[in-house]
Image (cartoon, rainbow, N blue to C red):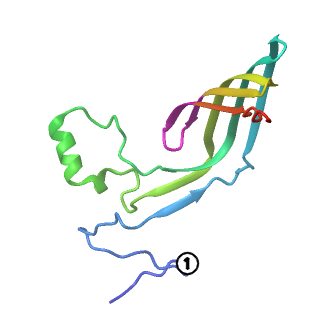
Amino acid sequence: MNYTILPNGASPYVAGASANYSARTAQRIDPNLSNPYTMNWNTTIQYQFKPDWLLELSYEGSAGVGLLEGWNINTVPFNISSDPNTLNTIFKSYQNYRPFPKFGEIDQWGNFGHSTYHAGTVKLTRRFSHGFTISSFYTRSKAIDNCDNDMVVAARLITTEVWRKPAPATI
């Protein structure tokens, strides 16, 4: 068997016309990668509406910017055809319609990831007096990222209280 040797000493991959290249993968890392970073911000307002009662409103947010994310750039374009017969043909021999048919997945890694988080909290507190204290929190939050297209909305209510038992009467 004879192999072609290129001037740089490499030998190109040799396969027959019916070879399936879908298991052959590659990765490309953006040469201009930068360090990702996060931003955080918050604000809180407190209001004492009675001597022992305090209302607190809070907002908290954060964002991840320039997060490292991989993306398969060797997929058949979504708008390649709207004809059902053509789409059926493509489905049967998908590999032949990739932009680089001699490769399966080609992952492009770059700084195009992003995430955000927002939360609001309402807190109501009665300071300890007359043997009783209570704190109640309600938080609603939302987290979104573009890596897995997840959006999580959560709500949580927590209440804590302390009641001091009166001392037993002495005889």
Please report the bounds of the magenta region as a residue range: 140-156
- State the residue in front, 42 or 8: 42
Residue 56 position in % (x across, y down): 76, 20
- Residue at 61 percent across and 42 percent down: it is 112
Q: Which residue is denoted by mark 1 in the rendering?
A: 7
- The correct choice, above or below, for 57 with respect to 17 in the image is above
Q: Is residue 58 left or right of residue 70?
A: right
Amino acid under disc 1: Pro
Q: Residue furthest left?
A: 85
Q: Is residue 106 above or below residue 18?
A: above
> Percent from the top left, x then y, of residue 51?
85, 13
- Please tell me which residue is depicted at 53% across the width and 61% down the height of the picture: 27
**Front residue (pair 146, 22):** 146
Does the magenta run of residues contain 155?
yes
Residue drawn at x 32%, y 90% is 1
The one of 51 and 1 positioned closer to us in this rendering: 51
Q: For the C terminus, give its image quadrant.
A: top right
* Extreme-top residue of the structure: 49
Judged left or right of residue 84, residue 115 is right
- Disc 1 crowd rating (10 Å Cα; few below 14, some 14-19, many 20+) is few
Query: Circle 1 — which element?
Result: loop
Outermost residue, bottom side = 1
Residue 146 part of the magenta-drawn span = yes
Please say if 16 is above or below 123. Answer: below
User: Within the image, what quadrant is residue 2 found in?
Assistant: bottom left
Where is residue 130? Give x, y as percent. 79, 23
Report how many numbered discs are placed on residues in the image: 1
Residue 59 x/y as whole percent = 72, 24
Give the residue at the far front of this rendering. Answer: 171
Does the magenta stretch mainly form a helix, a strand or a loop?
strand
Residue 111 placement, left or right of 41: left
